[in-house]
Image (cartoon, helix red, strand yellow):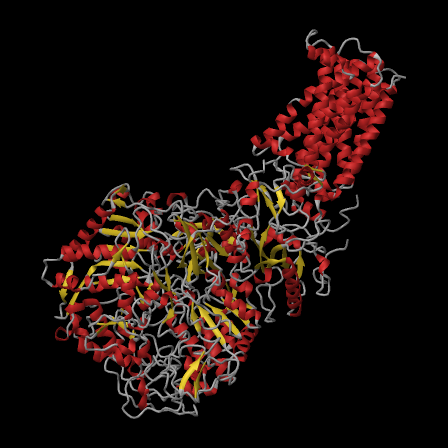
Amino acid sequence: MADSDCVVIMGANMAENHPVGFRFVMKAKERGATIIHIDPRFSRTSALSDVHVPLRAGSDLVFLGALINYTLKHHKYFKDYVVHYTNAPVIINDDYRDTEELGGLFSGYVEKERRYDAETWRYAGQPVHSGAEQHASEDFQTREGVAGQDDATKQQTDPTLQDPRCVFQIVARHYARYTPDMVEQSCGVPRELFLKVAEAITSNSGRDRTTSFAYAVAWTQHTTGTQIIGACALLQLLLGNIGRPGGGILALRGHATIQGSTDIPTLYNLLPGYIPMPSRPVQSHATLDGFIREEKLETGIWHDLPKYLVSLLKAWYGAAAQPDNDFCYDLVPKIEADHSFQAMLLMMKDGIMKGLFCMGQNPAVGGQNSILGRQALANLDWLVVRDVHEIETAAFWYDAPEARRGDIRPTEVKTEIFFLPAAISAEKEGSYTNTQRLVQWHDKGVEPSGDCRSEATFLYDLGKRLKELYRDDDGPRGRQINAVTWDYPTKGPFGEIDLEAVVKEMNGYTVVDRRPVTGYAELTDDGSTACGCWIYSGIMPEEGRNLARARSGDDRAALDWGFAWPGNCRLLYNRASADPDGRPWSERKKWVWWDGEQRHWTGHDVPDFPTTKPPDYRPPPGAKGLAAHAGDAPFVRLADGKGALFVSAGLKDGPLPTHYEPWESPVSNLLYPEQSRSPVALSFPRPDNRYHEPADLRFPYVLTTYRLTEHHCAGGMSRWVPWLAELQPEGFVEISPELAGELGIDNGDWVTVSTLRGQIETRAMVTARIQPLRIDGKTLHQVGMPWHFGFGGLAAGAIANDLIALVEDPNSRIHQAKALTCNLERGREPKAGRRGTGGEGRGMHPSRDDGA
Amino acid sequence: MTSTYRRGWESRRGSGRSVEDASRTNYYGLPAIHKPHWNWLIIAYFFLGGLSGGSYAVGSIAGLFGDRESRKIARVGRYISFLALLPSPILLILDLGRPERFHHMLRVLKVRSPMSVGVWVLLIFGAFCSLSAAGQAAQDGLLGRRNGAARLLRALPGHVVGALGIGSGFALGGYGGTLLSATAVPLWTKNGVLLGPLFLLSAVSSATASITLVLSLARGTRPTTLARLERLESLALLSEVALLLFTQSRLGRTIARPLVKGRLGLIHHFGVLGLGLAAPLVLQYMAAFRGEAPSRVVTALASALALSGGALFRYVIVTAGRLSADDPRATFDLASGQSPTAW
Amino acid sequence: MRLLKLLKQHVGMVPNPISDATREIRARTRGADVSISVCPYCAVGCSQLVYSKNGRVINIEGNDASPINGGTLCPKGAATFGLLTSPARVTTVKYRAPYGDRWEERPLEWAMERIAQRVKETRDAHFEEIAVDGTIVNRTLAIGHLGGATLDNEENYLIKKLFTAGLGIVAVENQARI
Amino acid sequence: MRELDPANGSIGPESSAANTGARRGALGFVTDVTLCIGCKACEVACKQWNDLPMDDLGLTGHSYDNTNDLGATTWRHVAFVEQFGQGRGSQSMSNAPGSNWLMLSDVCKHCVNAGCLEACPTGAIIRTEFDTVVIQQDICNGCGYCLPACPFGVPALSQTDGKAHKCTLCYDRLKDGLEPACAKACPTDSIQFGPIAELMPRARKRVTTLRERGVESAYIYGDRAVGGTGGISGLNAFFVLIDAPEVYNLPNMPELPQRKTMASYLTTIGTAVACGVATYLTLRNR
């Protein structure tokens, strides 16, 4: 990022939430880069940026679409890159109809089921993917491998980009109405300001310059989150900013190993390494062969899926997994429907789910519609909470606002609760994967005190006990738990398992001599190798050499610091940093290039491209796997090796990012008046999760939630820590002086914020950092609330998530907390129904504490 | 769940005052410097210390003359001085955050630190004062007649000891002012060079007033003695009022605000300037105007007023200084670069 | 001579009398054990140095050698020591019985056994071997798991392995979704 | 004395090194507001290393500043100033640092001539071999005289131990060759630590760069022209600011409080002599 010439931070508050990451932005800035922050609020990030663009929360896609349109209209795209490295020249089949033609819908919409049939989106001349029809109806996360098409060798293309059915022209038509005027009307961003930003981005992209984007949950937490990111990817591909130093799209993630917990997923729909979970409704998933047939791609790295999957099964089920029993594929549970976080809340509330483990998560504060969330917890038979502090999720039964108010009594809550104290990073060893896929090991400094234990110790102990309990059970229940290999070496006073043994299992080893493999290329599908997470393969290339522990850095790619998957490559698709002939695009932006004499790829980084594949390589007909990719196809993880401007399969809401209003919006969709909300967003309309209709006058303000530097997520690791609590001691809502003037509110007054889900009282921070916008000719007020606060801890406050609804992006199943509507009034909640906020009695104006 | 929808402008009460409005010209009105924690202990000490030092000096000077009436003045001065001295170290020590470490004050002597100098002054003065008081007590037979110590003390040349101690007496009377002036507190340090003299004058006036008060109440004091004391007292009071008004006029409006505004302003105007300084002067001059010696009652009243004026003056100066330290505008006014070193 | 020196140090315009204790001041990390850790808060992945003496952590600060943070930390990272030594940190097992109105102290061993029993009960009662359409599913929907993004990769692996592969729990989720 | 006009600049890069009276080998901080992201890592790192308790002021409503001031238990304090009166947001596109939301990490200035040190009657406050100013906790008896003697409002008395406290510039760490905790933690190098002889030229260069990039108002606070005025002779912890000092709650041209002590002594002695003579004359029995 320090190499960027222009950094656009949008949907993120980088300086506040990733201050140390922001170092690199500051470095770029000091080297002359332009920093642009596009965000509803003027935050600490804005303060350090060259431009702050205040826009309406939830209108990001209009802005990005307009940038795409600007790029195309003014011929600012990087033509050589676009033609060679993206699917822009690919011809799409004739049945495809765009949103421009169908009033906001793509062809293939099945209205009854609120879903798309993606068949019409396929490339011309390609057969319908065998599973495409089914895929759209099921519940798994988009796998990047699907994003292209099955067979790269059969594409019809037009390298001149002139064919009206080619992707390039389709994209141009799709975004033609995303104009600066539309930005002004819909985002509330003055036309001139937009043009300034567009000019800065496009003039800082190309052969010699690169622009990078950084986003965080303010892009993902929308019903169109995936599409917003898609729009940015599209723009960056057009500008040639992917796979190059100082380019790219950085996802700024919030937890220490949120990347690792996606790679090695504690997610319902994935197996380690982004292999989808077998699903019951997908009939082919019933058997191993069927699953492989369904999910394997003929070209690209996903061709080797059988090797990854069989090795995983060998790692899990060990000796029990044999070729004749399909390596125990049948023991892998099959998902039924949506079991994501929000669905889980409803499963708990509705009594389907009886027991819950909660390790380092605080859904009573951090979950959307947390009132419903707490009711769900109260409906469990048992709950195991493992954390450092007595978080709200453990204390809800006596301390929640509804309990303080007397609406629920502890003696009415049936949940049996186990609170087990957890060890912290310095008290245990293990690895985290940071937001740039870098795996780093942390050593154990001291033994944890008291009953505090690491999760690994807890899990190992629990697993042993369960194995013991099921020892004599020959039924399916017993078979499943007994087949799992659970024999790890232990050490230390608490019988902790040696986690390097787990690393080795994740890395993969040969079954015969248990020798670690050096990379996923060594994996086989005959059961001779075991590998717990194929993308992490190579992290322990030889016994005892844990690369996560590598600790010698330099100021370039720092290849000897930690391990980045895949194969320690730091910049994904870095083949794109060289031109089609393998030469660096420019001296300034040198990263990876083809060494013609040595006949291999070399550079500052580990190429994630086959090292010896020459730039002029052309695949022979019928080639499989990576061999089917040409020497100028950098996107090795995609089927055709080309960056996908047009995503023909794998997305639930269309092949091209399209703007839909947030589920709850005060304005209607100016681009597609017939189609205000996303046609495929997943909603849960029920009495305890009511929605506001678009432009509901009772809820005239846009509410967005955010985080503060001083706290961490739902606060379990910060609100109890005195040094952090004092820095942001209480919750608040930020409102503009204009709105404050209208409502008669002074800085520090109590205000009540309400939605149909809940009502909370908090302090007003009246600040010009929030400003009203002119949207479609009318003034629109936005308010912002940090969502860290809860009723426990030293820094307490109303729970912002009490206001949020359960509604999901169909692809990622992430909720929408960054743009919704609310009402806001002066004064505290009426006494009768007052919810304790936990923040009472520590007001900022002691003399006039009683605001109402 | 939601209360009824209501348009905001129907109930306009607040003004939408924002974060920014609170920090237009300074930082949310927060103090830019830290005020001292000093409370009544220090105020009392400043008064008693001044009284003690002043009484000693006045008494000792009177002791130089050798006549009976002057000896009376000296005697009263020595006793008042000693009595006022007694609580002083206690007050000072109680004021410390760590009283048990009071002796750390004697680790160093810093010439530029009035407090350090003051500590040593107090020590030296304490020796003189105690010696003189003991000598006086021995002469008055309060220590017994026979014992060797009393005899030794009686042999002490009281006027010589007193003469040597005059300087330390004045130093004790005046250093409080220099102590306050050597700070960043706007009200104290602006025109700070006048604060020492002001304190000293106040010490002399208080001392004279207290001696006058005692002698006016005692039988057998000649009116001429009282008149002499009153002359000194009115001279000190006049100088004090003149210097005080001069100083105040040069503080500037922002810095002088605590002396003018609010309760403290009232105390300053009516208590210090009115009852404490003007009233005694008026009482004395009314008599003088009528060409007669003032009655003992008037003298006693005037002295009592001057004495309380002296105490109030300490209170007002210390409190006003603390208030001005809390006012960032005063601090910034002081440090605006506009001739801060005129004096 | 010494007297002169003493006078010089203690008397004058601005004497500088340094105490013996001051002369002895040293960084408390001197001689401490150091282990390398990673900040447990956000996903930037700052490297930390954990200093300990006699089995107790005495200080945590940034690791200068890291190409990511180069010794720096954000306020949360800088408060890691505060998290570790937080006065509110719970170090014993707390148990709340169904319909109970207070926490009870229980031994860890008891809690572990009880949890294992409850998992087995719930799993046995709600285990699904074959779905209605005849597909082998081997799952239970009655148990869920939340969290993971603040844990270690290895722990995530063990969660997935034990809960999903071993117990058939499909509702395993973490913060990546929220 | 001349008025400060940040726009015209208090010092140009051409100014000589004599702009600070820092002694040879002096160590200190430069805190550059144009690099500060207001993250408060310095506050926490300081509290962690020095084992200082929380202040617990509650929500102040002063933007994101909830510690308000330097104090006995807060030795680094980040000030937040919102200035949106002149239009909103940074829309300059000029690559000019600085915006409408100012943030500054304030700290003890470790004055070249320090008021607190000169005032301290116990000798608890000393000047170290690094030219920094430290309160020796084994000596301080809590007289509180250093509080008003500081023109920047730095030292404060602790409610718990009764002693005066302030930043030590991590004297203990310096002794072991370690960087002070705040400077080490600062993610954006807004706080830089080093010898004044290096920091001052670096800061001057920074000011020049900033002015070239359009931040005309950039200047150094803490040399003999601004901040280190009136006998203070410069600050070993100095700042690069872009607005008037008062905006950051700093005095423009502070004075060493003891600067007038001698004059004060003289006037007092003069008055004493006058008083003595007057007393002698009035009390003399004529």
Q: Residue furthest top?
A: B146
D26 relative position to A316: left or right: right
Quadrant of the image occupied by residue A813: bottom left
Q: How many marks?
A: 0
In this view, the residue in front, C86 or B39, is C86
Q: Is residue A273 above or below residue D256?
A: below
Query: Residue A175: x and y, percent?
Result: 44, 80
Query: Residue A683: x and y, percent?
Result: 31, 65
Asked if one can make out residue A170 in the rendered structure from this viewpoint, the answer is: no
In this view, the residue in front, B35 or A38, is B35
Query: Residue D260: x and y, percent?
Result: 75, 42
Q: Is residue C157 above or below residue B209?
A: below
Query: Residue D178: x and y, percent?
Result: 53, 55
A821 relative position to A47: left or right: left
Q: Is residue A634 above or below residue D129?
A: below
Asked if one can make out residue A165 in the rendered structure from this viewpoint, the answer is: yes
